[in-house]
Image: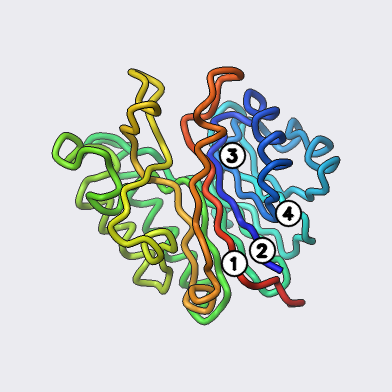
Amino acid sequence: MALRIATFNVNSIKSRLDVVLDWLQRADIDILGMQELKLEEGRFPFAAFAELGYECAVFGQKAYNGVAICSRLPLEDVRPGFGDPELDQQRRIITARVGDLWLVDVYAPHGDARGGEKYFYKLEFYRRLEDYLRRSFSPKDRVCLMGDLNVAHRDEDVWDPELLRDSIGTMREEREAFGRLLDFGLYDVFRHLYPGTHKYTWWDYVGGAIWKDQGMRIDYLLVTRPLLPRSREVAIDLGPRRRRKPTPSDHAPVVLTLDVEPSPG
């Protein structure tokens, strides 16, 4: 039986709850990583997800950031944050285990133009994320890192490479930081399965970008080598994004299908 793992930047779970719940019922998702919840744990709609059979682990923040992993399989060893009180003031990462499958849900900073405070914070976040992976896991472990990483790794991950060259999300320093995650031993499953394919996961609300497909691929499912041969498909579901009412997130969910079930850890 296949395992379906999804990542979805919901851009406020309060505003997008009906969209997410409706999509979950149609998409048959086993594990969902969400980003940009924009609320604290105490205000998360646990009951609504429980009605659909999901257990949720949440690391939330009022009005900004926030991540969650919701699973139809038992979650164990939940680790909110990096374990650094200063860095974890922004709630951007949560880790959990399902059997012997480790899930790392990440909402990377958006950043800013080169040289700004947010630009340096984004690069530091990536450095700390790489360090966290190396301290916590081996490339031989079964690890799936998912989330909105706010970097378009290659030119084929943006609709117009020349127009967007050296802008936020395409700067050389950002792409190199992303590349160091891969150097740890992670693989971009979408790019592995579909080399050269141009598909996107985020579109600006302005100018009807979704209908023109003027987007960027900044949402990822990255896996270690033990999971790579088990990775059957990665699908970007445009349904939740291509709607007018209720207002959608500016991201589309991305779904990885694995030919494997988590075994007991």
Q: Closer to us: mark 1 or mark 3?
A: 1
Asked whether the residues under the numbered discs 2 and 1 touch, taking CB atoms below 8 Å apart as contact, a structural biologist would say yes
**Quadrant housing residue 166:** top left
**Residue kind at label 4, given as amino acid type:** Ser
- Sequence-wise, the earlier of marks 4 and 3 is 3
On the question of residue 89 being in view, the answer is no
Give neighbour class at mark 2: few <14, some 14-19, many 20+ (Cα, 10 Å).
some
Tell me: residue 230, above or below residue 195: below
Q: Position of residue 238 (x, y in %)?
A: 50, 37
User: At 67% across and 66% down in the image, what residue appears?
Assistant: 2
Q: Circle 1: is it few (<14), some (14-19), or many (20+) Cα within 10 Å?
A: some
Left or right of 224? Residue 56 is right
- Front disc: 1 or 4: 1
C-alpha separation, residue under disc 1 versus residue under disc 4: 15 Å
What distance separates the C-alpha of mark 2 from that of mark 1? 5 Å
The answer to whether marks 1 and 4 mark residues whose Cβ atoms lie closer than 8 Å is no
Would you name the residue on which mark 1 appears? 258
Question: Foreground: 103 or 132?
Answer: 103
Report x, y in % for residue 240: 56, 33
Cα distance between the residues tagged 1 and 3: 26 Å
